[in-house]
Image (cartoon, rainbow, N blue to C red):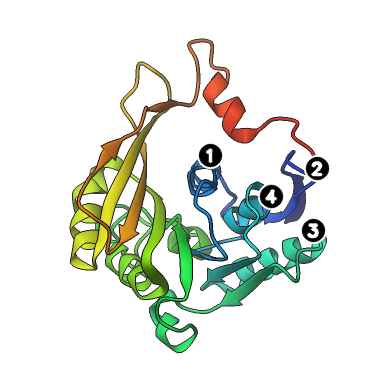
């Protein structure tokens, strides 16, 4: 069932499918990390319903943002959200396979690539009966290697890749990034709360960048009372309007 959710940020709204993959805190954290990079042209890979592209339209002054999504239903939702927010001239939603980027875009045509990819190797977990959820969560249609290879093709020298993933995949992430000349520059762990181990990692890389990795202060989502921390409230920019 389709619904319209208020993002409570600059009047932005998003169309979501209650039975499909709805965005979570990881997409918000990804957009927050990527907002610092100046860009004339940004692309969000594995864009789903377009949440990261929508948030970047509000958090940055990037004039052109692309949202690339394989699933037709998710891409349709993203297009509806773009129209709902009057962003047709700024966000372009493209329904295609990221493994096909060489036939869609010129090499090195983007300043920033963002991605919230499928986290789970297809052989590592029981897949969900819902096809949309399976594709969003498991490396069925694309692998981590596919994502980073596409990002390397799309980025200008010095361009930035921002990715959110799981900490247990860090070795795979860093190895693939270096193989494709994207140097890891910043890493930030995200913990459910101070007493629990991290379950999300944010990574920033620079295409053809120098070798230096810096650790950012960790993010804690909930406090000891089960409420969002001040960090999360600041990231969500609660109540911020245009």
Are the residues flagged by discs 2 and 4 in contact, CB closer than 8 Å?
A: no
Q: Quote the CA–CA distance across marks 1 and 3.
A: 21 Å
Instruction: Kindly state the secondary structure of the residue where label 2 is placed.
Output: loop
58 vs 167: above or below: below
Return the disc, 2 or 4, that comes first in the chain's sequence: 4
Please state the horizontal and vertical placement of residue 150, each as a whole percent of the image: 36, 72
Q: Image point 44% across, 60% down: which residue?
A: 134
Quadrant housing residue 83: bottom right
Q: Circle 4 sits on which residue?
A: 58
Q: Circle 1 sits on which residue?
A: 25
Nearer the camera: disc 1 or disc 2: 2
Q: Foreground: 206 or 102?
A: 206
Are the residues flagged by discs 1 and 2 in contact, CB closer than 8 Å?
A: no
Q: Foreground: 113 or 26?
A: 113
Apparent side of residue 36 relative to residue 179 in the rendered image (left or right) = right
Find residue 85 and name its label.
Answer: 3
Q: Foreground: 44 or 140?
A: 44
Q: Is residue 139 visible?
A: yes
Q: Quote the CA–CA distance across marks 2 and 3.
A: 13 Å
Quadrant housing residue 141: bottom left
Near mark 2 (Cα within 10 A), the count class, few <14, some 14-19 or many ≥20, is few
Return the disc, 4 or 3, that comes first in the chain's sequence: 4
Q: Image point 41% across, 76% down: which residue?
A: 108
Apparent side of residue 239 relative to residue 97 in the rendered image (left or right) = right
Q: Foreground: 107 or 8?
A: 107
Q: Quote the CA–CA distance across marks 4 and 1.
A: 17 Å
Find residue 242 and name its label.
Answer: 2
Quadrant housing residue 53: bottom right
């Amino acid at each position: 069932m389709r619904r319209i959710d208020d993002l409570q940020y600059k009047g932005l709204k998003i169309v979501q499918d209650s039975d499909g993959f709805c965005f979570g805190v990881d997409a918000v954290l990804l957009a927050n990390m990527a907002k610092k990079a100046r860009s004339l042209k940004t692309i969000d890979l594995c864009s789903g319903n377009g949440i990261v592209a929508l948030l970047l339209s509000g958090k940055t002054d990037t004039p052109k943002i692309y949202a690339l999504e394989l699933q037709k239903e998710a891409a349709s939702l993203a297009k509806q959200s773009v129209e709902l927010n009057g962003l047709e001239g700024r966000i372009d939603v493209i329904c295609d396979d990221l493994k096909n980027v060489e036939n869609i875009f010129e090499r090195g045509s983007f300043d920033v690539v963002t991605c919230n990819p499928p986290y789970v190797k297809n052989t590592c977990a029981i897949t969900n009966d819902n096809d949309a959820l399976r594709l969003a969560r498991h490396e069925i249609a694309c692998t981590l290697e596919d994502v980073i290879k596409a990002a390397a093709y799309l980025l200008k020298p010095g361009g930035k890749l921002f990715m959110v993933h799981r900490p247990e995949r860090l070795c795979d992430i860093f190895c693939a990034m270096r193989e494709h000349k994207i140097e890891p520059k910043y890493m930030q762990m995200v913990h459910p709360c101070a007493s629990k181990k991290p379950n999300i990692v944010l990574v920033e890389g620079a295409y053809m960048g120098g070798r230096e990795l810096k650790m950012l202060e960790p993010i804690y989502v909930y406090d000891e009372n089960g409420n969002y921390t001040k960090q999360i409230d600041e990231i969500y920019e609660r109540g911020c309007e245009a």
